[in-house]
Image (cartoon, rainbow, N blue to C red):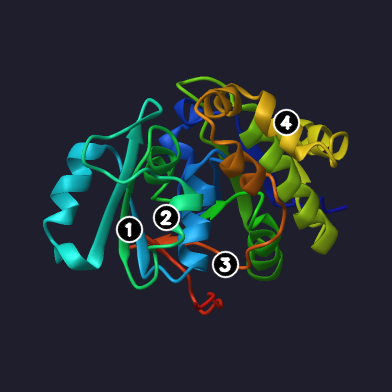
C-alpha cells in the first residue's frame, strides 16, 4: 500500500532560527512581523504605493535610494525600535497618507531582515492580521502542492508572541479553505494559540514585548489597527528585490 506524502506547513519561531539550506525553490515562505513591518507593507500597497523595497539596514536604504528620483521615493525605517535619523517613521497610520504612487524603501530591525533572509524561496509573501485572509486564500488556491514555511520575525532576537499569534490566524484561515497540509508541532502550537484567543487579538498585541514598547510611546492606534483581521485584500509578494501586488485592487482617494 502506497503512503501519500502531504506537503508540510511549518512555523519558524524567529528569524535567527532560519536555516538557509531549507529555504529553497521547493518552499513557499510567508513572513510575519505584525508590529509592524508586514502590517506596514500591506497597508502601503493597499493605499496605492507602487512598491516597497525591504532592506537590511539604514545604510542599504540610502544606497538603494540613490537609484531613484527623490520625489518618487519615501525612505522609512527604524533600528532597535528608534526611528532612523532622517527617515520617516515606519508606522502604517502615518505612511498610508503619503504612499500613493511612491516607491517606499523600508528598513526595520526584524521584518525586512526576515524577508531578505528567505528571498531564495520559491515565493515569498508578507502576511499580517490585516491581510492574512487574502494571503491564505492565494496560497490555498495556487500552492496546494507546496510545502509552506511561516517565518515569525521575532523581536530583538527573541520569540515574538504577536507574530506567533499571526501565524496561527493565517493557519486557521488556510485550513478553512484547504486542508491539504500536514502541520508540524510548531504550526499546531500557533494554531492552538490563535483558536484559544480568537477574540483577544488586541490584548495579545498590547501585552507582547513590542506591544508594550509601542504603548509606552503612545502608539496604541497602530496596535489596534494591526490587530484588525482581514481588512486588507492585497497580497504582497517579493520579487526582484521588491514587494508589490500582482493584480489585487488598491484603494484610491
19 vs 72: above or below: above
Q: Secondary structure at mark 4?
A: helix
The residue shown at (47%, 62%) is 237
- First in sequence: mark 3 vs mark 4: 4
Tag shown at residue 104: 1
Categorize mark 4 by other alpha carbons within 10 Å: few (<14), some (14-19), many (20+).
some
Residue, disc 3: 234
Tag shown at residue 95: 2
- First in sequence: mark 3 vs mark 2: 2
Q: Real-space Cα distance between discs 4 and 1? A: 29 Å
Q: Real-space Cα distance between discs 1 and 2? A: 9 Å
Q: Secondary structure at mark 3?
A: loop
Image location of residue 47, percent across then percent down: 49, 68
- First in sequence: mark 1 vs mark 3: 1
- Asked if labels 2 and 1 touch by Cβ distance under 8 angstroms, the answer is yes
Q: Is residue 124 visible?
A: no
Residue, disc 4: 204
Amino acid at each position: 500500500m502506497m503512503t501519500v506524502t502531504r506537503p508540510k506547513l511549518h512555523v519558524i519561531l524567529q528569524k535567527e532560527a532560519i536555516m538557509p539550506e531549507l529555504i529553497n525553490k521547493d518552499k513557499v515562505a510567508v513572513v510575519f512581523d505584525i508590529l509592524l513591518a508586514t502590517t506596514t507593507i500591506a497597508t502601503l500597497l493597499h493605499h496605492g504605493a507602487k512598491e516597497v523595497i525591504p532592506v537590511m539596514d539604514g545604510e542599504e536604504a540610502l544606497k538603494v535610494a540613490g537609484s531613484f528620483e527623490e520625489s518618487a521615493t519615501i525612505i522609512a525605517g527604524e533600528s532597535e525600535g528608534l526611528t532612523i535619523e532622517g527617515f520617516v517613521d515606519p508606522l502604517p497610520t502615518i505612511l498610508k497618507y503619503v504612499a500613493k504612487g511612491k516607491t517606499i524603501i523600508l528598513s526595520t530591525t526584524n521584518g525586512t531582515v526576515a524577508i531578505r533572509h528567505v528571498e531564495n524561496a520559491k515565493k515569498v509573501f508578507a502576511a499580517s492580521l490585516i491581510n492574512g485572509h487574502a494571503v491564505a486564500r492565494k496560497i490555498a488556491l495556487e500552492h496546494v502542492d507546496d510545502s509552506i514555511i511561516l517565518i515569525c520575525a521575532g523581536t530583538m532576537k527573541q520569540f515574538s508572541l504577536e507574530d506567533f499569534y499571526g501565524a496561527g490566524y493565517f493557519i486557521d484561515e488556510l485550513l478553512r479553505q484547504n486542508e491539504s497540509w500536514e502541520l508540524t508541532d510548531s504550526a499546531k502550537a500557533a494554531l492552538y494559540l490563535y483558536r484559544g484567543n480568537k477574540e483577544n487579538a488586541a490584548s495579545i498585541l498590547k501585552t507582547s514585548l513590542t506591544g508594550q514598547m509601542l504603548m509606552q510611546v503612545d502608539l496604541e492606534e497602530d496596535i489596534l489597527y494591526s490587530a484588525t483581521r482581514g481588512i486588507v485584500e492585497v497580497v504582497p509578494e517579493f520579487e526582484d528585490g521588491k514587494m508589490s501586488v500582482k493584480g489585487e485592487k488598491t484603494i484610491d482617494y
